[in-house]
Image (cartoon, rainbow, N blue to C red):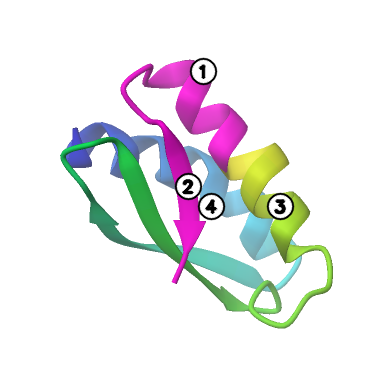
């Protein structure tokens, strides 16, 4: 599943990079928790929670049903 998650993040990454940010995959647990680190402008952005939940998590869950949630670490 890690490879699927990385592939989806590669599709999302350009839109984050356009705003000076990025996302790094840290871990994918066996129970479907995806752990990521927001980097660059995303790391300190007040909208980062919205980006994480309504952006990254929504896309990952729609593409990979096994994903239960996305957490920032």
Q: Quadrant of residue 27?
A: bottom left
Tag 3 or tag 2, which sits nearer the N-term? Answer: 3
Estimate the spatial distance between the alpha carbons at disc 3 and disc 4, rounded to whole Å.
Answer: 12 Å
Residue drawn at x 36%, y 48% as measured from the top left: 34
Label 3 with label 4: CB-CB less than 8 Å: no
Q: Is residue 40 left or right of residue 70?
A: right
* Neighbour tally class for label 4: few under 14, some 14-19, many 20 plus, Cα within 10 Å: some
Residue 14 location (% of width, % of height): 59, 51
Tag 4 or tag 1, which sits nearer the N-term? Answer: 4
Q: Is residue 61 above or below residue 27?
A: above
Estimate the spatial distance between the alpha carbons at disc 1 and disc 2, rounded to whole Å.
Answer: 13 Å
Q: Is residue 42 above or below residue 67?
A: below
* Residue found at the very far right of the displayed protein: 46
Q: Nearer the viewer, mark 4 or mark 2?
A: 2
User: Does 60 appear in magenta?
Assistant: yes
Estimate the spatial distance between the alpha carbons at disc 3 and disc 1, rounded to whole Å.
Answer: 15 Å
Residue picked out by circle 1: 62
Q: Which mark is residue 70?
A: 2
Q: Which mark is residue 49?
A: none
Image quadrant where one finds the N terminus: top left
Q: Which mark is residue 13?
A: 4
**Which type of secondary structure does the marked residue at label 2 adopt?**
strand
Residue drawn at x 44%, y 19% as measured from the top left: 63
Q: Nearer the viewer, mark 3 or mark 4?
A: 3
Residue 56 location (% of width, % of height): 57, 43
Q: Is residue 27 left or right of residue 70?
A: left
* Neighbour tally class for label 2: few under 14, some 14-19, many 20 plus, Cα within 10 Å: some
**Which type of secondary structure does the marked residue at label 3 adopt?**
helix
Q: Which mark is residue 51?
A: 3
Label 2 with label 3: CB-CB less than 8 Å: no
């Amino acid at each position: 599943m890690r490879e699927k998650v990385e592939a989806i993040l590669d599709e999302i990454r350009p839109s984050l990079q356009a705003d000076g940010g990025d996302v790094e995959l840290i871990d994918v647990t066996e129970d479907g928790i995806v752990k990521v680190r927001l980097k660059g402008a995303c790391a300190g952005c007040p909208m980062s929670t919205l980006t994480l939940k309504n952006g990254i998590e929504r896309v990952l869950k729609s593409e990979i049903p096994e994903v239960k949630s996305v957490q920032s670490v």
